[in-house]
Amino acid sequence: MNDKDFAFLKELVETPSPSGFEQPAQRVMRREVDGVADELRTDVMGNLICRIDGQGQDRPKVMLAGHCDEIGFMVKYIDDNGFLFFSPIGGVDPHLVPGQRVQVHTSRGPILGVVGKKPIHMIEPKDRDTVTKFKNQFIDLGCADKAAAGELVAIGDPVTMAVGLERLQGDMVTSRAFDDKMGAFIVARVLQEVRRKGPAPVDLYGVSTVQEEVGLRGGTTSAYGVNPDVGLAVEVGFATDHPEMDHKDIGEIKVGGGPAIARGPNINPMLFELLVRTAQEEQIPYQVLGVPRATGTDANAIQLSRGGVAAGLVSVPLRYMHTPVEVLSLTDLENTVRLLTGLMYRITDRHVFIPN
């Protein structure tokens, strides 16, 4: 990955965007694809929709969706001593939160706080393995009282972990919020590559969707609005190449092993075969992920839109999902961009996706 693309990825994942508060990240996305699109618009939900027109007659409409929202928290109450009580936005593990530094995103800008934690010396041995419920966790801003905290923070302000993107060894990186701003990053990169290579035989809609973590909401509304013939969710997927992951349950998915192409009832079988053939012809390493039910991603919303859509799911293997230390391979990102770009030039007829 070149320095320019790495800087874009870093800025995107570090820009706060809990579900319902995605516009700071969407502004980064809009800047990156501005000038690439034949049409660029934001719908009432906040989805950013970028269209690149193809060439030829009766062109299929293809939608790529990567959601730009991340898990986080919301301020619910300020007590008399100035401590903030909060609730999670999306699927946050309560084990991970006490003792963390956080950013409260206010109308005046981000404010640093810490999630308080009773010292282990003061916890009874029988209680040390007990998870503190979210309603009992609190953020300390260092304020003297409720009035001082209320001058800084409003009820409903979003909160994120105060960590960003860092390099590990080799091509491995860690950050919060790779799920799924990494997917939005890939969508933007595919749009840029298609514009660079020249018109594809499809009309390509790249969508940075919102509110996936709280119910696939942006994917549902954008798929209805775009009304694609083919739609692919670009997501993270569970890597199983680290301790405590069960291959018999999830399968064998390795970070650095290439994009994972999903197969199952949520996935159009002809689209799956075309993705595999594209990977083979382009000499892109890939993995197959068996999903015997709805995937729980925007692919589910896309497949069920209107009268049905030929849906696909391409995932980048990710370790430690929904933690502040998610880990992935930059090479997997680049190979996913190559795969989806190559796919755009191999879709020529919407009718080939009808099962027979």
Image: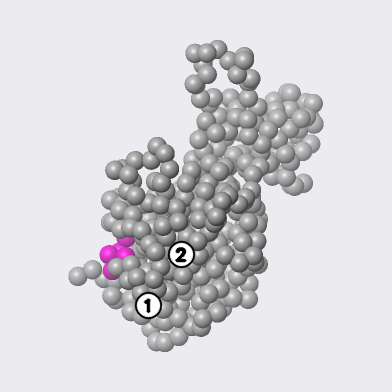
| Image quadrant occupied by the N terminus | bottom right
The amino acid pointed to by label 1 is Arg
Image spot of residue 207 (x, y percent):
51, 64
Magenta residue span: 267-272
Report the side of 318 relative to 106 (left or right).
Answer: left
**Residue 136 position (above or below residue 58):** above
Q: In this orientation, which residue lies closer to the viewer: 260 or 211?
A: 260
Residue 325 lies in the magenta stretch: no
Relative height, residue 328 to residue 38 (above, below)? above
Name the quadrant of the C terminus. Answer: bottom left
Q: Where 174 sits versus 137, above or below?
A: below
| Residue lying farthest to the front in this orientation | 170
Q: Secondary structure at mark 1?
A: loop
Mark 2 Cα-neighbour bin, 10 Å: few <14, some 14–19, many ≥20: many
Residue 191 as seen in the image, left or right of residue 111: left
Residue 307 lies in quadrant: bottom left
Total of numbered circles in the picture?
2
Q: Identity of the amino acid at label 2?
A: Thr
Residue on which the image places disc 2: 336
Residue 319 position in % (x across, y down): 47, 46
**SS of the residue at dot 2?**
helix
The residue at the point 61 percent across, 61 percent down is 6
- Choose between 97 and 325: the one closer to the eye: 325
